[in-house]
Amino acid sequence: ALDPNAMFKVGFLDDVYKERPVAPVVTRFPPEPNGFLHIGHSKAIAINFGFARHHGGKCYLRYDDTNPEAEDEIYFTAILDMVRWLGFEPVEITYSSDNFQKLYDLAEQLINKGKAYVCHCNDDEIKAQRGGENHGPRFRCAHADQTPDKNLEEFRGMRDGKYKPREAFLRMKQDITDGNPQMWDLAAYRVLEKPHHRTGSAWRIYPTYDFTHCLCDSFEGITHSLCTTEFIQSRVSYEWLNRELGVYEPMQREYGRLSIQGTVLSKRKILKLVTEKHVRGWDDPRLYTLIGIKRRGVPPGAILEFVNELGVTTAPSIIQLKRFDQTIRRYLELTVPRLLLVLDPIPVVIEDADETALEIDMPFSPKVPTMGSRKVRFTKTVYIDRSDFREVDSKDYFRLAPNKTVGLYQVAYPIKATSFTKDDSTGLVTEIRAVFDKETKKAKTYIHWVGEGSRACEVRIHNSLFKSEKPDDAEGGFLNDLNPESEVVFPSAMIEKEGFDEVRRRAPWPEAAGESALGKGGPESVRFQGMRVAYFAMDSDSTDDKIILNRIVSLKEDSGK
Ligand code: ATP
Ligand code: MG
Ligand code: MG
């Protein structure tokens, strides 16, 4: 099912390669370690690592850690974990901050060339120089006329603590007559009095994205620097700086961002959901952070398949959640085994069944015979789902009811209900009595069941976290759009013990196409289809005594189950 090369057979990346058909191809995935990765990043990961893999090249994981104000240690490991989980191994892990000295030296070189100056203007002055709100004429401030020697002295002053933040910054001397704002003397360095998590207090000045990114790409010999389309305008300044400094010039090309409709991805919003306890944490299965998607039990292969299906173009894609679900469902259908799971069990006593349990050999998947089979215990008392029984029969109803026959999945004879007991206080059926119906050879409908000795578990059914497709448009903000039924917990679910233990033992499912190499380890690698119910994975809150399952996705779109 998984072909990481598939996405490059079509679309614009072929053309990108043709523009520079070199070997080896060298790419990088350059996250800023200031948050957890989300579904959108999986596209960036797939593209950068996938493009390199496709061409037999290499891809770096580069932490773009030039802003000590926003970054945190925990994100470094979390990011690497997700890259590996998706099945990619960086050829090397690098840090923009490792180049701080080299970048500094190049900044001095740029100053010496007369292509950078230290400026002391404030935000309003800079705005005015750039034409102001009415797009008036552009002009340079007097600082632009300083000699290289003066700039060098000033820049060293910045470095040595002569200036407070915002009192001075290094600007590149580009081309203010160019219509592209990325050429209007961008900032290259600013003063920040903040210790850096890797370089400590060695530096008081930090390079900007515009100064850092193209140079780090150059240092690493990146052949194709792939980024999202917000950076189209930046291509000009990217090329300008490398050219001015006479360093190796990578080629920047852009692809469309992946956006998902029906959820929020911004760090600030997810943080609010987490701190106000609307979700269980950053890894809540209802979120579209990669750690959340992983916890829900979505296999990494399904995410890559999703990115492949969307294709790579320069157009941004706004995708509905249900489209992601469709891909997951299609992927799981052929890669995970099927088990018996009853969400809301009622005991059915089959009066004429033997007291001793019978073992029924059941295949793990009718679609994939190589998955093998397991023995399921059929006992005199079995459990069926409450929704498969009706106290009053009707013509258009084909499951169990008094005097009505229904098949039990893979059991030789169908059963017919004879009577039932109810709890007076709750009005709920507590037990059904039944007999085998040996006259009916083939039942119209087969329902799922589990035998005595099955294992109790907690099942969390996740629905969309928001009621609408556009939570951000809700009156009063996205928090007013929360779906009160986004997590429904079944505390009394039961699962056939033998099959489940076997799945746990063999997980990740060895025969599952593509999966064996991906997503090794972790409880969420235990995935299966609960027949007639949904796809499930084991939640990381599970212990040996208590199994907690997450619904990965329903069996059908909008089935409510
Ligand atoms: P966010 O603010 O959502 O975290 P970002 O652009 O700040 O996004 P980085 O952490 O800098 O993200 O991202 C690393 C790489 O992932 C960048 O090359 C970025 O362009 C890419 N990326 C981020 N979001 C998306 C997305 N939605 N679709 C495709 N690529 C993305
Ligand atoms: Mg980010
Ligand atoms: Mg960023």
Image (spheres, rainbow, N blue to C red):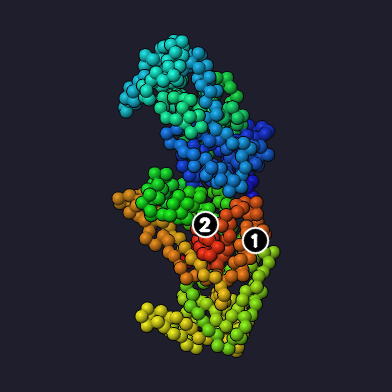
The residue under label 1 is 506
Q: Position of residue 416 (x, y in %)?
A: 53, 86
Residue under the point 52% across and 40% down: 76
Q: Amino acid at mark 2?
A: Ser
Q: Is residue 552 above or below residue 67?
A: below
Residue 244: image location, x then y, percent:
53, 19
Question: Residue 329, how many percent across, how many down?
Answer: 55, 60
Helix, strand or loop at mark 2: loop
Does the numbered disc 1 mark a residue whose Cβ is under 8 Å from ligand 1? no
SS type, badge 1? helix
* Identity of the residue drawn at 56% across and 42% down: 80
Q: Is mark 2 within 8 Å of ligand 1?
A: no
Q: Is residue 402 left or right of residue 366?
A: left
Cα separation, mark 2 vs mark 1, equals 18 Å
**Residue at 47% over, 72% down:** 344
Chain-order first, disc 2 or disc 1:
1
- Most extreme residue toward the left is 476
Q: Image quadrant of residue 156?
A: top left
Looking at the image, which residue sits at the far right? Answer: 370
Q: Tell me the kind of residue under disc 1.
A: Arg
Residue 182 against residue 407 in the figure, above or below: above
Q: Residue furthest front?
A: 545
Res 540 label: 2
Instruction: Name the residue at 58% across, 27% down.
Output: 218
Q: Is residue 21 above or below residue 109?
A: below
Name the quadrant of the N terminus: bottom right
Residue 263 location (% of width, % of height): 42, 51
Does any portion of residue 19 appear in the rendered image? no
Rate crowding at label 1 as few (under 14), some (14 to 19) or many (20 or more) other CA atoms within 10 Å.
few
Q: Is residue 462 visible?
A: yes
Identify the disc placed on residue 491.
none
